[in-house]
């Protein structure tokens, strides 16, 4: 089975230890479907203080990450000539989506650059990266948590990572439709009951109910998704009923 290798360039390697050692990502590593190499950016600074940032030209608040350590880290990652897709985690990047996750899940190697402070020297963005990705229109203290979000989203799409691949195909956003409501035991909880159709054993009625409720939830919460959902004739009929 095909897996993926992720290289992470960061000033704070310890941030990744716990998430990568738990749950699905841990199992993916154990199965050989995920390999993660964490590169401490300070190891690629050449001055005695291991400086990776400096004051911005032209003045202004904050510090800017220097280009030299980042490029040295990239050269180390690619020293054997095996290319990887280079992604900068940045609030200025294109917003991350499920479609983008599916696209990246087909890559064999990805390198994530985790920015900090006021950002990185613009020459890195212009000449040394393939893509910039944002996980939303807000600013975090660094690119580490966004990188983990992207890694988690793409790794679970790799066949063999999630035990039941059907559950992945039914995820919200997989087909531009939010997921249908899910229920489990007990059948009645503090007066709130599981919909009777789910207890009926009639698989066709359950299928239709789930699709209708998924469409209802999408229409209520994210109607913008419906225009790209590729709705079937059955879907259109169900939407009319809603």
Image (cartoon, rainbow, N blue to C red):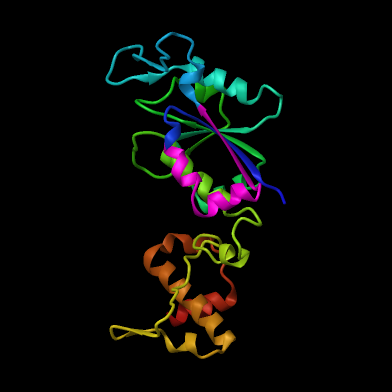
| Residue 34 part of the magenta-drawn span | yes
234 is higher (above) or lower (below) than 114: below
User: Quick one: 43 or 183, which is closer to the camera?
Assistant: 43
Residue sitting at 60 percent across and 45 percent down? 104
Where residue 115 appears, as percent x and y from the top left, is 43, 29
The answer to whether 118 appears left or right of 102 in the picture is left
The answer to whether 78 appears left or right of 61 in the picture is right
| Residue 61 part of the magenta-drawn span | no
Residue 56 picture quarter: top left
Question: Is residue 42 visible to the viewer in this orientation of the structure?
Answer: yes
Where residue 53 appears, as percent x and y from the top left, is 39, 17
The answer to whether 76 appears left or right of 180 in the picture is right
Image quadrant where one finds the C terminus? bottom left
Residue sitting at 65 percent across and 42 percent down? 107
Tally of marks: 0
Question: Is residue 102 visible to the viewer in this orientation of the structure?
Answer: no
Where residue 70 appears, as percent x and y from the top left, is 51, 21
Residue sitting at 54 percent across and 49 percent down? 26
**Residue range highlighted in magenta:** 15-39
130 is higher (above) or lower (below) than 34: above
Residue sitting at 44 percent across and 89 percent down? 196
The answer to whether 98 appears left or right of 223 in the picture is right
Where residue 117 appears, as percent x and y from the top left, is 35, 26
User: Quick one: 176 or 145, which is closer to the camera?
Assistant: 145
């Amino acid at each position: 089975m095909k897996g993926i290798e992720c290289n992470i360039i960061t000033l704070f390697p310890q941030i990744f230890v716990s998430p990568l050692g738990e749950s699905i990502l841990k199992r993916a590593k154990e199965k050989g479907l995920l390999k993660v190499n964490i590169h401490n950016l300070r190891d690629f600074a050449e001055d005695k203080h291991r400086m990776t940032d400096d004051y911005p030209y032209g003045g202004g608040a904050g510090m800017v990450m220097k280009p030299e350590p980042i490029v040295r880290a990239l050269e180390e990652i690619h020293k054997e000539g095996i290319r990887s897709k280079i992604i900068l985690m940045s609030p200025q990047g294109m917003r991350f989506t499920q479609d983008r996750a599916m696209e990246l899940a087909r890559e064999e190697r990805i390198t994530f650059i985790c920015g900090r402070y006021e950002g990185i020297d613009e020459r890195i963005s212009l000449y040394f990266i393939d893509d910039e990705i944002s996980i939303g229109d807000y600013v975090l203290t660094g690119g580490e948590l966004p990188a983990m979000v992207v890694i988690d989203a793409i790794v679970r799409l790799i066949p063999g990572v999630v035990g039941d691949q059907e559950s992945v195909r039914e995820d919200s956003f997989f087909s531009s439709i939010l997921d249908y409501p899910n229920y489990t035991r007990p059948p009645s909880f503090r007066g709130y009951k599981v919909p009777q159709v789910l207890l009926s054993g009639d698989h066709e009625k359950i299928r239709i109910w789930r699709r209708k409720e998924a469409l209802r939830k999408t229409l209520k919460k994210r109607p913008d998704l419906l225009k790209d959902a590729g709705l079937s004739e059955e879907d259109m009929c169900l939407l009319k009923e809603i």
